[in-house]
């Protein structure tokens, strides 16, 4: 009888300690999640305020209105919206998972970060003369968010990563106000030099887990455009006239997040760098009907 009582007491003490650990873990997770939400809220308010004064404050305002810009910049801006939503959702998810939040809520709460952020930008556009709320932008936002959330629910990893690359072009000099006058501005505004990539992880998509194929090697398909000095059409003469062409690229890439590390600093450093497509040789096909080989494409 005494042994039974002792056994029961021992079991109860184990459950009590386990319950206490569980409560402590939950408190720690709640505290970490509050930190993450606080950081994201501060980023949202600060960046939105800065964006308003840097981009919108000097433009005339008008009542909320819609604007069809689906043919502008040969859809490069739409692919940019898609990419931004995907990347922001990826980081939103990662921060919440590292804070200890469960997978499902991290996917929904973190994965929609980009959509919430870019919807606010779209509302600013809707109140500004010269722009407007674009349903095309919103569709691109939703698709970028959906790609991240869908993969995370289906595979619990990102087997198709959306990336960005940039090189300077000759076109910015003809319209620096619109395409940028410095390298950083051109990287954000000159669609002629931007390329957006879907980077497919070869091993996780096409091979079995036992394969010795490098898990970090990807195949990438890119989209770009060239010859643009204006949004819907090019500037008139005497500005040189260029053929506006779409470009499709085929190349290799590296998934830097597949490089193993337990150090959180290096983990996030590699994740940030993974936004950018690694320069590799690339094969281009453009709507001018040409195939072009690039020994090293940025």
Image: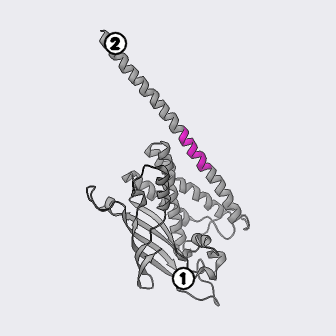
32 drawn magenta: yes
Q: Which residue is identified by label 1?
A: 227
Label 2 Cα neighbours within 10 Å, binned few <14 / some 14-19 / many ≥20: few
Range of magenta residues: 31-41
Instruction: Identify the colour scheme used.
Output: one colour
Q: Nearer the viewer, mark 2 or mark 1?
A: 2
From the viewer's perspective, is residue 108 above or below residue 297? above
- Quarter of the image for residue 4 reads top left
Q: Does residue 234 appear left or right of residue 7 in this picture? A: right
Q: Is residue 26 above or below residue 292?
A: above
Q: Is residue 223 shown left or right of residue 240?
A: left
Residue labelled with disc 2: 5
Is the residue 19 above or below the residue 36 in the image? above
Secondary element type, mark 1: loop
Reply yes or no: does residue 277 show up in magenta.
no
- Give residue 247's position: percent from left, percent from top: 46, 78
């Amino acid at each position: 009888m005494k042994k039974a009582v002792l056994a029961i007491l021992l079991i109860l003490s184990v459950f009590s300690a386990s319950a206490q650990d569980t409560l402590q873990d939950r408190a720690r997770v709640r505290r970490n999640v509050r930190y993450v939400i606080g950081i994201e809220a501060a980023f949202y308010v600060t960046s939105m305020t800065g964006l308003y004064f840097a981009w919108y404050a000097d433009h005339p305002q008008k009542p909320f209105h819609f604007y069809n810009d689906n043919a502008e910049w040969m859809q490069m801006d739409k692919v940019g919206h898609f990419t931004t939503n995907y990347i922001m959702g990826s980081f939103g998810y990662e921060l919440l998972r590292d804070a200890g939040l469960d997978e499902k809520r991290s996917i929904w709460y973190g994965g929609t970060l980009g959509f919430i952020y870019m919807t606010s930008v779209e509302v600013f556009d809707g109140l500004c003369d010269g722009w407007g709320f674009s349903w095309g932008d919103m569709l691109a936002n939703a698709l970028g968010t959906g790609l991240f959330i869908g993969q995370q629910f289906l595979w619990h990893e990102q087997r198709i990563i959306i990336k960005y690359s940039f090189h300077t072009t000759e076109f910015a000099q003809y319209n620096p106000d619109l395409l940028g006058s410095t390298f950083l501005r051109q990287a954000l505004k000159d669609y002629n030099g931007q390329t957006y990539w879907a980077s497919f992880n070869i091993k996780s998509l096409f091979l079995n887990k036992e394969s010795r194929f490098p898990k970090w090697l990807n195949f990438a398909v890119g989209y770009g455009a060239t010859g643009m000095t204006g949004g819907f059409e090019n500037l008139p003469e005497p500005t040189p006239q260029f053929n506006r062409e779409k470009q499709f690229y085929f190349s290799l890439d590296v998934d830097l997040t597949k490089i193993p590390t337990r150090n959180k600093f290096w983990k996030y450093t590699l994740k940030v760098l993974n936004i950018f497509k690694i320069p590799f040789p690339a094969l281009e096909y453009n709507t001018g009907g040409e195939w072009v080989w690039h020994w090293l494409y940025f």
